Amino acid sequence: MTVVNDIGLLERTITALGRPAWEVMPEDVDRVVADLAVKGRKTSTRREYVQILKDLHRFLQARKAPEIEAAFGVRLVCPVDEFHASRHVGDDSPALVPPPTPERVAKFFDFMK
């Protein structure tokens, strides 16, 4: 990640997430990607948002993880779900359907209890 080239995208990504990078959860990433899809943004744009977040977390883990944990009591974990990372930004993503809510997912998996 080059700061000069990517600072604008990084600022837009953090603004869209609405919270500090160390507080971002996978649901936040899904929400932002779904919002971009609904707005008609290209697959490549959605991938750029996900990639910049992955790059930021890789940097923070390598250089700032101890300070973040000491200051905020948070162990830094990248919120990008690696299994679904390429799927939820692909052309085959549902453009108008947001990801399921946690309640809907819980209801779906009730049969496993």
Image (cartoon, rainbow, N blue to C red):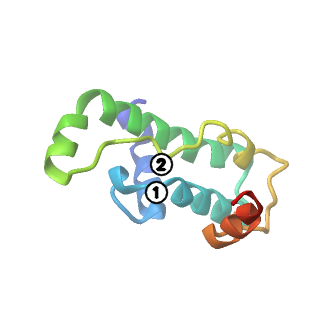
Residue at point 78%, 68% (across, down): 97
Nearer-the-camera pick, 42 or 16: 16
Is residue 39 shown to the viewer in this render? no
Is 10 left, or right, of 37 in this rendering?
A: left
Q: Distance between the residues labelled 2 and 1?
A: 5 Å
Q: Regarding mark 1 in the picture, which secondary structure is present there?
A: helix
**Which label was assigned to residue 9?**
2
- Picture quadrant of residue 33: bottom right
Query: Which class describes the residues within 10 Å of circle 2: few (<14), some (14-19), or many (20+)?
Result: some
Nearer-the-camera pick, 78 or 11: 78
Residue at point 74%, 43% (across, down): 87
37 versus 60 height, above or below:
below
- Picture quadrant of residue 55: top left
**Which label was assigned to residue 12?**
1
Is residue 16 shown to the viewer in this render? yes
Nearer-the-camera pick, 103 or 47: 103
The quadrant of the picture occupied by the N terminus is: top left
Amino acid type of the residue tagged 2 in the rendering: Leu
Q: Regarding mark 2 in the picture, which secondary structure is present there?
A: helix
31 versus 91 height, above or below:
below
Q: Position of residue 66 (x, y in %)?
A: 19, 35
Q: Position of residue 6 (x, y in %)?
A: 44, 40
Q: Where is residue 71 in the image (x, y as percent from the top left)?
A: 14, 50
User: Number of numbered discs present?
Assistant: 2
96 versus 46 height, above or below:
below
Q: Where is residue 70 in the image (x, y as percent from the top left)?
A: 14, 45
Amino acid type of the residue tagged 1 in the rendering: Arg
Whether residues under marks 2 and 1 lie with C-beta atoms below 8 angstroms apart, the answer is yes
